[in-house]
Amino acid sequence: MTSALRLDAIRKTQGRRELFRDVTLEVAAGGSVALVGASGVGKTTLLRIIAGLERPDAGDVWIAGRRVTQGQSILAPPHQRGIGFVFQDLALWPHMTVAQSLTFVLESGAPAVSRLEHRRLVDEMLRLVHIDGLGDRYPHQLSGGEQQRAAFARALVHRPPLLLLDEPFSSLDVDLRHEMRTTLRELRGAFDFASVFVTHDREEASAVAARTIALTFGGGLESG
Amino acid sequence: MITGRGLAFALAMAILAATCVAPLFFLLTAPAWVGRWDAYRSAIVDARQIGLLVNSLRIAGSVAVVATAIGTFMGFLLARAPIQGRNAVRLGLTIPVLIPTYALALSWIFATGTESFAALTYSTVGAIIVLAIALYPVPMLATEAAVRHIESRLEEAALLVAPAPRVLTRITLPLLWPAIASSALLTFVLALSDYAVPNLLRQRVFTTEVFTAFAALYDSARAATLAVPLLAMTLVVAYLIVRRSAGVVDVSRPSSRIGIGFPGIRPVALTAVVCVFGIGAALPVGTLATEARSLGAIREAIARSGYAIGESLVLAGIAATITAGVALVLGYRRARSKWRLAQWADAALIALFAAPGTLIGVGLIELWNRPGAAGLVYGTPAIIVVAYLARFLPVAILIVSAAVRRVSQSTEEAAALSGAGWVRTMRHIVIPQIAGSLVVAWVIVFVLAFGEVGASVLVAPAGHTPYPVHVLTLIANTRPEQVAALALVQTLVVVCALSAASVYLASSPRRHD
């Protein structure tokens, strides 16, 4: 079976400092991995390399059986990788309502599909993340939890087979964090996507992923 | 009990009121003082007035469109294209806004003075081109700053689902829109308030009419009539600028990453930089240098007008120093104000900055040309300093208040908790953090004051003519090479001052703001 994600000997330096080397990882379709490690170890950088937002110094990235990064060459740009990404600061577009953001994502990926179908998909997604009825709100009109849900909706509305999450719950209180973990499990059940979840909290890692892997300073990955 | 803070604020407000607000108040109420109420009616219904309004709007609107188109493109390139020596390139591209507009207009007259361009020289198109060259750096700098402040993750989130061109049009440009719109509006009012270019290129607009009404006809009621629509327009536009600036882009901190990069557009960027720098800075300066013909002409110009240059530099320096002090107090107060209507204060400051120099000049005469203490100031070079304050104090306050807003209030609270009073906190905590912006405010006021014409042409006392006014008065009866040499000297002084300030700011180890 083709894996959702494969990393082969990824190496990255920042200035003179080697962030990590020989990072090798495989995530099966529908599988989930939590990536833990101390601050500054390069967890976010690794996610950005997977997404194609940064180039590694060496190594290959494979997504759904297709090589998308080879050494320092980006073979497939980010939007052709079939990835959803939940950023740590959410990065919701401030000039678009939630529905407009989701529509933008759908129109970018499938411009030929009718507006009616896009609207149906947007409504369905908003319902799944429990913010139906808030589609016409701008990000600043949403609470912290609602913004989180909007970010999940945007990342998944185009049904990507791989979801990358960069410490998305770090700014939430304990109750909201539990709620969002439940939502994440529900979404995984609905869409069956593979996921890589970056966190520095081991307890959270075991709650959101089947497998925990630790990234160490200047080294590679170790099973956690 | 009178505190140091209260005293400083009262003094600064008094200076703002006496130099910026009161002159315009006196100008606007001048017809009422002499019972000419009909003047106000004619401000709205007079056909001549409407024609003037249309012509002024046409020129200012066209300038705003052209300058914003050029400036936005160049600002985006400065922020995102791989340009080597970016700071030097930015400085070079900013030169046109610092060259006095009369010098740009003169270089235009010299450059198009041949038969094949004769129809263009004294035309509306000519005025639009010259003012667009003078003002494109405003939207350029605003766009560059706005692009740098776009949080890169907003673009990256879009890059995951869409190609770069679509991200540019649907994410980046909408985020930039408030900054672009604000700078376009600012460009519009600055074009509307310019006096030197329409005067030299023989265009009938509000500012030239105000000058004619007062200086030639001594008709202050007519000047007030002309002022009403002009000031109303600047106030409305200033409010729109403030509203737009409070838009969706968070300008409080630059993005930690670059966002969408365009490595492939290096050749386009280089071509654009060379063209815009060539047309905006090299061509005008080159034209003036060619027209001056020799170093001898420049030496002669300096010898003949050295006193005017020296006095203008001193007066501009005094004005810039007073302005920096007053702006520090008022800018701080504005930045820390939680008053709900404070936005109107910003709008009023922008409107005061955009008020045409000729209007301010007439207002200053109405206010200060009277017996008593005011008369003592009016007949001396001090009135020129007052004119510079009237014109440029508002922009300095805006610069300082923007800088103070970036200073964390908790740093002041920590000082207050340790027992420091307001003066001590300002001296040891706030000023060190905004020193760069204070220097910028000083340099901008100095450069603008050194090139100021609109107000000083009306108020300058006999024997103390500021340098640019001196050049303007020589145009009619002096050889072209002499005039070109004089304009060139002024341009070089401005460019040298700016370069020195840039070097200082770039080398300063304390770059907190």
Image (cartoon, rainbow, N blue to C red):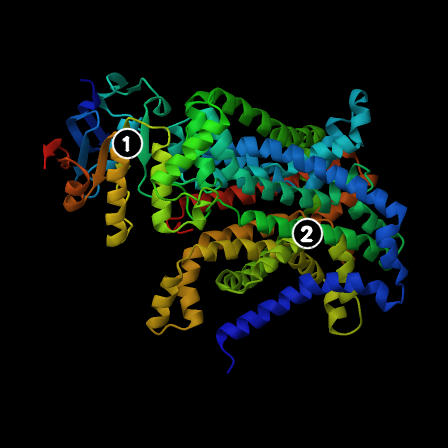
> In this rendering, does residue B163 appear at all?
no
Most extreme residue toward the left is A223
Residue at horizontal 83 percent and vertical 44 percent from the top: B52
Residue B221, x across and y down, in percent: 86, 59
> In this rendering, does residue B500 appear at all?
yes
Residue B197, x across and y down, in percent: 74, 40
**Residue under numbered circle 2:** B236
Judge left or right: residue B9 versus residue A102: right
Residue at horizontal 32 percent and vertical 39 percent from the top: A87
Secondary structure beneath disc 1? Answer: strand
Nearest to viewer (mark 1 / mark 2): 1
Mark 1 touching mark 2, by CB under 8 A?
Answer: no
Question: Residue B284 bears which disc, if any?
Answer: none
Q: Nearer the viewer, residue B189 or A80?
A: A80
Residue at horizontal 68 percent and vertical 49 percent from the top: B452
Q: Nearer the viewer, residue B437 or B180?
A: B180
Residue at horizontal 28 percent and vertical 36 percent from the top: A187
- Crowdedness near tag 2: few (<14), some (14–19) or many (≥20) residues, C-alpha within 10 Å: few
**Is the residue at mark 1 from the same chain as the one at mark 2?**
no
- Residue B33 falls in image quadrant: bottom right
Residue B494, x across and y down, in percent: 60, 43
Secondary structure beneath disc 2? Answer: helix
Q: On screen, A148 above or below B369?
A: above
Circle 2 chain? B
Mark 1: which amino acid? Leu
Q: On screen, B452 above or below B119?
A: below
Q: Nearer the viewer, residue A127 or B49?
A: A127
Residue B295, x across and y down, in percent: 65, 33
Judge left or right: residue A207 versus residue B433: left
Mark 2: which amino acid? Val
**Residue under numbered circle 1:** A163
- Crowdedness near tag 1: few (<14), some (14–19) or many (≥20) residues, C-alpha within 10 Å: many
